[in-house]
Image: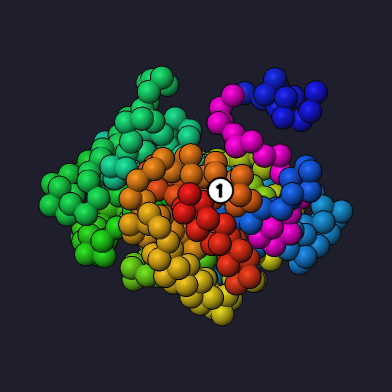
Amino acid sequence: MGWKELDQTYLAHAYGRFDMEAASGQGAVCKDADGREYIDFTSGIGVNSLGWCDGDWAAAVGKQAATLQHMCNLYYTEPMAKLGKTLCERTGMKKVFLCNSGAEANEGIIKTARKYSFDHYGKGRHTILSLNNSFHGRTITTLSATGQDAFHQYFDPFTEGFRFIDANDLNGLKKAADETVCGILIELVQGEGGVVPLEPDFVDGIARICAEKDILLMVDEVQTGMGRTGKLLCCEHYGIQPDLLSLAKGLGGGLPIGAALMGGKCADTLRPGDHGTTFGGNPVVCAGANVVLEKLTGELLDEVAAKGDYITERLLKMPGVKSVEGRGLMLGITLDKGDSKKLAAQCLEYGLLILTAKAKLRMLPPLTISHAEIDRGLKLLNEVLSL
Ligand SMILES: *Cc1c(COP(=O)(O)O)cnc(C)c1O
């Protein structure tokens, strides 16, 4: 049996996979088991921020693996402390809890919001407002926080204490923000929901209400963070400073990591025993994340923004493209017609890896993708859209 058949036999059928076996990669070019090349407009799903097998990243990860691969969280390690310092300094947050995924980072900020409120107001002020069409993860609680009915099946009972409002409906939000609410959780660009950016006035309004009512502003930057939109945080585009922030996907450059970051209000909410994880803050993973942060310089972030503009301009000239949404290298392509899933499968046949989000094609290329790689990928996409 080949690996594909073994996978189908032994791996839980939780994913509908494309028919490709990835074998190796370099930059934004992936090779399959037969040595065929593909241009990567996915970076996993926004994970390989430096592309495949960046030399400095791989060296730091390899060196750390050969030095100290794990230590439990009862002791200090250098890569973890260094990552904490850099993350806080560069995001304006005060403390960070390191974990292993986006869902876990969101669990961390949800727990912190509830405990902050419990510490200051006692029991009962535990509601978290979230947005319709949001996505916050696959654990029972983060599914509960996800504002899409499709995710609220089969797994009852879900976690209580979440309520949903429409994006950009400030009046609805004002009504919903009653005395039971401890936090408002948002993605600034809804990723899985179809690459839908929030309106700046709505985000301003949320920040104002949060400040007035001592409700914690919780921003899920699992997908939008780590340079994806041309700033380290998408928050910078909106001029907001969250009380709680979650990061994951691009943070580790390809290794599993999540981060729940706390602002001044709730920097000391979590005390020993309140929260924990065995693997969180793993030194190998942190060594990789430290390289990612070193490489996300202002210059690189400006390039991300410029590449996004260039790609958008080119896309808008392609057949069947109605509009392009998103920012930087997080782009959703609205098509005149056609099934985005089928188009993505056709792109694969032509040698291009691309994602979908609902009815849109979605691009999350590595932040380091070269202009030559962009042009190669866009040429393939244009061919598929011209079929
Ligand atoms: C991917 C994603 C998550 C979940 O991250 P996992 O690492 O899959 O748990 C949460 N929020 C947003 C916005 C995401 O895009």
Image spot of residue 346 (x, y percent): 54, 44
Q: Which residue is mark 1?
A: 347
Asked if residue 50 shows in the view, the reply is yes
User: Which amino acid type is marked by label 1?
Assistant: Cys
**Residue at 17% across / 44% down in the picture?**
176
Q: Is residue 268 left or right of residue 337?
A: right
Question: Quick one: 336 or 363, which is closer to the camera?
Answer: 336
Q: Residue furthest right?
A: 66
Question: Quick one: 283 or 270, which is closer to the camera?
Answer: 283
Image spot of residue 245 (x, y percent): 44, 56
Dominant secondary-structure state across the stretch colored magenta: loop
**Residue at 74% across / 59% down in the picture?**
26
Q: Dot 1 surroundings within 10 Å: few (below 14), some, or many (20 or more)?
A: many
Question: Quick one: 328 or 361, which is closer to the camera?
Answer: 361
Q: Is residue 138 above or below residue 286?
A: above
Q: What stretch of residues is rendered in magenta?
A: 13-29
**Residue at 33% across / 57% down in the picture?**
322
46 falls in the magenta region: no
Q: Is residue 361 above or below residue 156?
A: below
Image spot of residue 362 (x, y percent): 46, 52
**Residue at 33% across / 68% down in the picture?**
238
Which secondary structure, mark 1? helix
Q: Quadrant of residue 367?
A: bottom right
Label 1 CB-ligand 1 distance < 8 A: no
26 falls in the magenta region: yes
Q: Quadrant of residue 142?
A: top left
Image spot of residue 372 (x, y percent): 63, 70
Q: Quadrant of residue 376?
A: bottom right
Question: Quick one: 45 or 76, which is closer to the camera?
Answer: 45
